Amino acid sequence: MAASSDSRRGGGDMVRTPAETAEVRREAAVEAALGKLDLDAKARLLAGQDMWSLPALPEAGLASLVMSDGPIGVRGVHWSADDPSVALPSPTALAATWDPGLAHRAGVLLAQEARRKGVHVLLAPTVNLHRSPLGGRHFEAYSEDPYLTGRIGTEYVRGVQSGGVGTTVKHFVANDAETDRLTVNNLLSERALRELYLAPFEAIVENAHPWGIMTAYNTVNGTTMTEHHHLVNEVLRGEWGFDGINVSDWTAARSTTGALAGGLDIAMPGPRTVYGEALARAVRDGEADEARVDEAVRRVLRLAARVGALDGAEPVVTEPPAPVDGESLAREIARRSFVLVRNENGALPLGPGRVALIGAAARDARVLGGGSATVFPARTVSPLDGLTAALPDRSLTYALGADPNTELPVADQGFELRAVCRDSHGTVIGSRSAPSGLLQWMGDDLPEGVTHDTLHSVELTGTFTPRETGTHTLGIKGLGPFRLTVAGTTYFDDVQRPAEDGDPFAAFFGAPVPHARVDLTAGEPVEVSLTYTVPPPSGHPMHAIGFTLAHQDPQRDPDELIAEAAAAARAADTAVVVVATTDRVESEGFDRRDLRLPGRQDDLVHAVAAANPDTVVVVNSGSPVEMPWRDDVAAVLLTWFPGQEGGAALADVLTGAHEPGGRLPTTWGSLTDAPVTRVVPENGELPYDEDVFIGYRAWEKHGRTPAYPFGHGLGYTDWTYESVEVDATAEGTTAKVRLRNTGDRPGRETVQLYLAPGEADPTRPARWLAGFAGVEAGPGESVEATVVLPRRAFEIWDEATMSWSFVKGSYEIQVARSITDRRITATINV
Ligand code: BGC
């Protein structure tokens, strides 16, 4: 349990450590600053002044606190490639490393990125659970298992905060799907909350002492999370001793008095929020309690003191950690996250010989998932780039095979664009480079010199140099009046009016409409221009300007493309097919409808596998997809959204320079077999009927066999598990596992411990993950893994007493390579 700030402060004659002394001084600085603020200033501090920051209050020596998304990089305060950020692999990938140490190093790098960009608080990590594989934002969370999520999240937070930058663990709580996310009322038992959904938050609060959390959009058991007195004030703050800030998810705060009573400290984004002037008025009218306002302000000032934004307070970190090389860390995490789920007859690493690389995503890699998690890296290495660099002396051929895009994708490859802003007289008032055809300016994130009052139109303008000759299609995604011109011809000059669905981000999540079909020649640049006329400001609390120039290469006959790829595979010794999801499949803002690979990619793999038995399939997706061909190919490597260095890491692993190190953090199976899938509410409600049985807990309960089980993943060597010794005392349970590398190359193994009740109990899962450790050994060497099982592994939440209950009895400790590949066991009585 985390110590409360009071007990940490201590009293009497206690001897304090330097860290405790600094904390006492910070608390004193907080009180001093609080005393200098009047009600209006305090109320102002609790509301965003814009999209990403809080106001500075010079009278109290307080600088403006700046926040930014997270979690794989630090986008900063602009949606622009002008200030790039390193892009690490997706959170699912980080969890697949099963290596809290790597998560820590990721955090240190992100703090470095944040400091470079003047960001005090990273809006991360996302620790919601993979309840249903249909969850659209699945790639942004870690796992279906709360313990693994908590371990990875804890070190991520510790890493970021060791760099002096705050975190907001999100989204508190049960934001496990995207359908109707602003309003859905998730109905779940206190036991499911405690044992599953709250568990990662609790572990992180206890072990990493985060400086912030973010409360979710959704409602839990009838109360919206930004007003959830029970879960925020009683559980998070009361029971767990959390002393950081509680910031709303963006626009999630709905009521001034409700949010204040529910423990919300900061309403984001600004400037129009339920706090600020409205809060000061509520206090003056006697509707809100100023003491509660003071509590919230105290927490914001404490955050400022911790990150060094409050005069007179020494920040927690005075010497940032040694600089980290982002590119090499991104590459290391990627290869350590890749999960080799199938490798027949040693298909990988690749032998000598010719390689046919196939797939759209082999050339245009999908390195990250869509939505607020988007960052703009300075470079991306595609599989084609990575393999071209790694196999210089081998013949490497490339074939597209199949286009995964079922609709027009964002204009990207070959486009050089700027966004030019004009006032109502047509005078240019500012401009900014555009990373792609996707323009997304939220709040006051406008080019320098531009304000919402003066902005009349935005023109995305520049050149497009096609890489293929033929008929190109251009289109528009977004709401409102647009004019699209290509090579001097205007193809559209009208208004697009898709249905409103109430989500402020709707314009970003709809489908693009094709408008221009233009014959172009490879290598010959043409001028393109898409002008959007900005509507007058709406009543919505958040300004958002978002639209997309979409583009599709000339379409070839899909059968012909597949035949071409099969021919390339036939002519090579090995075929490597990269299949992928798209940002229309996995993104924030909507859920998935199925788990199929989009387009004709399944047909492509079948055809290539028929042409060459030595076919390796690389799956570039953030979360599970169905792989109907998986038994027909030689190897399957899951690479997640691998971040900016993904292609280089892929070459490391395919060539055998490094072992793929990942283990599945989530069960991969078909949608029809998956026991828990529902994400669509009925009458606004989504009951979590499965209670504590999600993920592998549910697969086992229903006796269903997934494609690949939780924890599964192969390396390039073999391991023999020799013994396990368990020491169970009143203080705790420790297992020592001895295992040997029986293969012929050095390797790393993730030793997994599952705890199974001695007597089957239908109210509990058959077994659950209770500990894990990574070990390394050379060929023939034996090594010992020490795994400590937390007390919580033996506890259940007792709804009758509303408390944790230690379940005594006999348990089997199962030492395993995955939940189904259990190697040795020991029985204990506790
Ligand atoms: C997301 C948050 C994110 C915030 C700011 C919201 O839509 O749910 O995760 O931090 O936007 O971009």
Image (cartoon, rainbow, N blue to C red):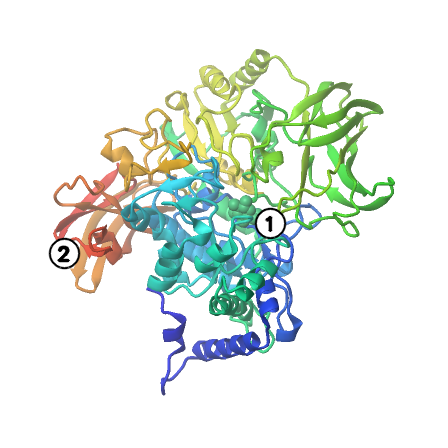
Q: Is residue 451 left or right of residue 548?
A: right
Q: Is residue 656 visible?
A: no
For the point 29% across and 49% down, the residue is 190
Identify the residue at horizontal 36%, vertical 84% (top origin).
Answer: 14
Q: Residue furthest bottom?
A: 13
| 471 relative to 229 in the view: left or right | right
- Badge 1 marks a residue whose secondary structure is loop
From where the camera sits, is residue 400 visible?
Answer: yes
Q: Position of residue 5 (x, y in %)?
A: 41, 71
Q: Nearer the viewer, residue 55 or 415?
A: 55
Amino acid type at circle 1 is Val
Residue contact between numbered discs 2 and 1, judged by CB atoms under 8 Å: no
First along the sequence among labels 2 and 1: 1
Looking at the rendered image, the disc whose residue lies closer to the viewer, 2 or 1, is 2
The answer to whether the residue bearing label 1 lies less than 8 angstroms from the nearest atom of ligand 1 is no
Q: Which residue is mark 1?
A: 86
Residue 700 placed where, x, y %? Answer: 25, 34
Horizontal and vertical percent position of residue 153: 42, 53
Residue 409: image quadrant is top right
Q: Give the Cα separation between the discs numbered 2 and 1.
A: 47 Å
Furthest-front residue in this view:
285
Residue 37 picture quarter: bottom right
On residue 624, the disc is none
Q: Is residue 352 above or below residue 647?
A: above
Look at mark 2 in the image and give the residue it sits on.
830
Give the answer, above or below, for where 7 lies relative to 471.
below
The three-letter amino acid code for the residue at tag 2 is: Val
The one nearer the camera, 146 or 351, is 146
